[in-house]
Image (cartoon, rainbow, N blue to C red):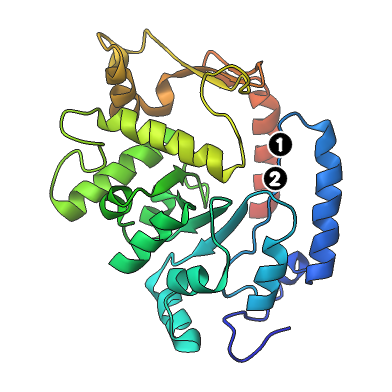
Amino acid sequence: MRTPDSAARAPAAGQARFVHDPDGFARLVEGAQAAIGRLPGGVVGVAPHSLRAVTEGELAAVSRLGDGPVHIHIAEQTAEVDACLAWSGRRPVDWLLHHAEVDGRWCLVHATHMTAGETRALAASGAVAGLCPVTEANLGDGVFPGADYLAAGGRFGVGSDSNVRIDAAEELRLLEYSQRLTARARNVLAGGPGRSTGADLYRGALAGGAQALGVADDGLAEGAAADIVALDAGHPDLAGRSGDQILDSYVFAAGSGAVRDVWRFGRRVVAEGRHTARDAVEARYRTALAGLLA
């Protein structure tokens, strides 16, 4: 149901196939929960797209489906903030924190435009800010208040939203550089003087990303999944580096070009810089693209 006092909007023709009522969505979640029994490490979460896509009642119903992660797009652009103020009298993050039980299960994707009060409140909630710096730069969205958020104890993860680029190091690099441009300072998101900015960014994103995915254990630890990234020790940008200097060079210089091998649950999926299914995936991509451009 759409109500006059809700930000929810009727879907456009191309969006209608993605829309479900709460009961239909609950059946989808139940099916997904049954299906993950065959998937090692599978986690089912829900993602009510945004405040403009659901009513308050729908948001409450969907967020209570299971105990997995809850992801929601919020406050990406100023127009979105203005629209939320017009219908509710509150800014998006402020509205969400006052109308939903936001806690460590939640990941607020973007959260670009927040007041100082919203920033502190989001950090205190225990939720994760899901940042997409490459996309946010590509779309001209704005800059996340990273320094204030981390100073308040906030947790963050990074991800790709529009797939303009898929590169974890580039996301972290752009996150830090956007803060530097805003603050006209250096090493803004490092945890303190003399600390490695690259290492602090990487470890912060690792912990926040694991939380946002509903993963109990992250990193190299007994009982954790054997999800491992190996960098190429012979890469010129890593030459002579050791300790946290390696992560500094990975984030701010080498980027994805230094990734040599990747294991997921102990199965190698990237070998010598190439995905094991790259040729097949590339062929399907070219075929799909040709069809779209015909």
Secondary structure beneath dot 1 equals helix
Give left or right: position of 159 versus 22: left
**Residue that appears at 59% across and 22% down:** 227
Mark pair 1, 2: CA separation: 6 Å
Does residue 282 lie above or below 154 as drawn? above
What amino acid type should be assigned to the residue bearing mark 1?
Arg
Q: Looking at the rendering, which quadrant does residue 49 occupy?
A: bottom right
Q: Is residue 174 left or right of residue 294?
A: left
The N terminus lies in which quarter of the figure? bottom right
**Label 2: few (<14), some or many (≥20) within 10 Å?**
few
Q: Position of residue 261 (x, y in %)?
A: 54, 16
- Is 53 placed above or below 287 here? below
User: Does 215 sit above or below residue 234?
Assistant: below
Residue 251 - label: none
Quarter of the figure that contains the C terminus: bottom right
Give the residue drawn at x 60%, y 42%: 213
Residue in the image at 48% along x and 47% along y? 164
- In this rendering, would 93 be left or right of 191? right
Q: Quadrant of residue 106?
A: bottom right
Query: Residue 259 appears at what percent x and percent y?
Result: 46, 20
The quarter holding residue 40 reads: top right
The image shows residue 230 at horizontal and vertical percentages of 48, 15
- Residue 160 visible? The answer is yes
Residue in view at x 27 percent, y 54 percent = 148
The answer to whether residue 11 is visible is: no
- Residue at the left extreme, as displayed: 184
Residue 284: which numbered mark, if any?
1
Mark 1 and mark 2 in contact? Answer it, CB < 8 Å. Answer: yes
Provide the residue designation for mark 2.
288
